Amino acid sequence: MKYLTLFLLFVSISGWTQSGFTSLGGANFLGLSRAGVNLGGIKSIYLNQAGLTDIKDLGADISFERRFNLEELTNISIAGAKSFKFGTFGLLLSHFGFTEYSEQKFGISYAKKLHPNLSIGSQFDLLRYNVEKVGSKNLFTVELGMQLKLNKEFSIATHVFSPGKSKITDATDLGTRVRLGVMYKPSNKVFMLIEMDKLIYRKPDFKIGVGYNMIQEAQINLGINPTLGFYSFGLHFNLKNIYRISSAVALNDNLGNSPALSLQYQK
């Protein structure tokens, strides 16, 4: 357990791209190689809050991911949102880790349509790191997002996490993270996501996700992240256009498989 703790400290503090916060949203995004900055609805609270404007009334989501199928690397996230005439408000809570090391995130978000084709969103975050026998560290930061529909087929979106500097330790910054994505939707049955994910002090990740609606109630998702070397597959079921169930698994030859599950309510 000591070595696992050291490993988590390394990947979580030295490399933000590998921390527990990257697996928020579970199967909503894992089946698409964690691309999704262009997606809307309650799930967008995890990657781009601007998409919350797609909620007409209420939305709720519970998501789970077990990274590399290890119980110690489990992430559980819960979110809810409510739409009003003046915008959409949301709440997010997540937990990652185990007794010796864990991370929590609490977020309050707001999204608004500035134009029928343009939405913006923001979120205020409290991030908490806990290390047994060492102590805890709290950080406050913000997130900013935008989604723009160019026409019926194309949309672009961007999201910035933690602009500016927030220190985890005296020698380590949290790191600004920028996502930029394009969505191509030639029909109601098929869509493609192409996304760049860039942490300020690391090379960018490139992600490709494809969704295909076999029937109105069922969708297949496929994804690839060549930078990190994993592939993903997911199934999404839509029940009465209110309840949604998603499952997904990511495959990596060196680190193993990561299963995920998401349950949604949205109307």
Image (spheres, grey):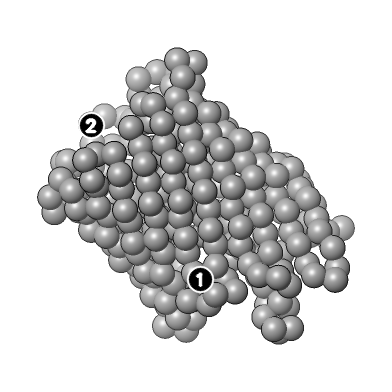
Task: For label 1, count other residues whose C-alpha is less than 10 Å away and answer few (under 14), some (14-19) or many (20+).
Answer: many
Q: Quadrant of the N terminus?
A: bottom right
Residue name at image x 48 percent, y 76 percent: 69
67 on left or right of 53: right
Q: Distance between the residues labelled 1 and 2?
A: 36 Å
| Residue sitting nearer the eye, 100 or 24 | 100
113 on left or right of 96: left
Tell me which amino acid carries mark 2: Lys
- Residue 252 position in % (x across, y down): 42, 77
| Residue sitting nearer the eye, 50 or 263 | 263
| Residue sitting nearer the eye, 80 or 124 | 80
25 on left or right of 2: left
Residue 15's label in the rendered image is none
Task: For label 2, count other residues whose C-alpha is less than 10 Å away and answer few (under 14), some (14-19) or many (20+).
Answer: few
SS of the residue under disc 2: loop
Kindly identify which residue carries mark 2: 152
Tell me which amino acid carries mark 1: Arg
In this rendering, the count of numbered labels is 2
- Which of the two marks, 1 or 2, is nearer to us in this view? 1
Residue name at image x 23 percent, y 31 percent: 152
SS of the residue under disc 1: helix
169 on left or right of 53: right
Kindly identify which residue carries mark 1: 67
Does label 1 or label 2 sit earlier along the sequence? 1
